Image (tube, helix red, strand yellow):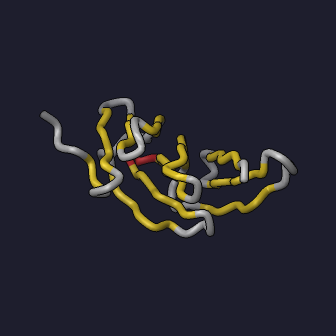
Amino acid sequence: QQTIATVSSDQNLIMTSVRSEQRIFQMNLPTPLWSCSWKDRSTLCVGGTQGKLFFVDGRGVIIYETILEKGPPIFSVSSFSSDLLLVSSPVTTKIFDLKAMKFLPEK
């Protein structure tokens, strides 16, 4: 299934089918949203204001939530490898370990 995910400052996460251009589902998260990236075929990583990072499964359920750093929004979430995400805000960038489900310590 080919799906596009989009987020917006009105707190909506929308998944749309590329083939049919039909909305698969829409959900409202608890904070304005700035960025998103697929973790795998069924899980989306979503960055929001106040440094919040959400993991949402294909049914629209928040399966995990954490904070990069309180304050600014997460403006970029991207796959660094199959096990790592690069998560950025205006003040910091950290690597998130998908196996351990936590940010790696800075060196």
In-front residue for pair 33/93: 93
In-front residue for pair 62/73: 62
Residue 57: x %, y % from top left: 55, 64
Horizontal side, residue 63 vs residue 93: left or right: right
Going 36% across and 46% down the picture, which residue do you hit? 83
**The residue positioned farthest toward the right in the image shown:** 20
Horizontal side, residue 22 vs residue 101: left or right: right
In-front residue for pair 93/10: 93
Q: Tell me where residue 36 sits by quadrant.
A: top right
Going 30% across and 33% down the picture, which residue do you hit? 92
Going 17% across and 43% down the picture, which residue do you hit? 105
Q: How many marks?
A: 0
Going 46% across and 37% down the picture, which residue do you hit? 78
Q: Is residue 105 above or below residue 102?
A: above
**The residue positioned farthest toward the left in the image shown:** 107
Q: Is residue 24 above or below residue 77?
A: below
Q: Tell me where residue 84 sits by quadrant.
A: top left
Residue 77: x %, y % from top left: 46, 39
Residue 49: x %, y % from top left: 45, 47
In-front residue for pair 21/14: 21
The quarter in which the C terminus is drawn is top left
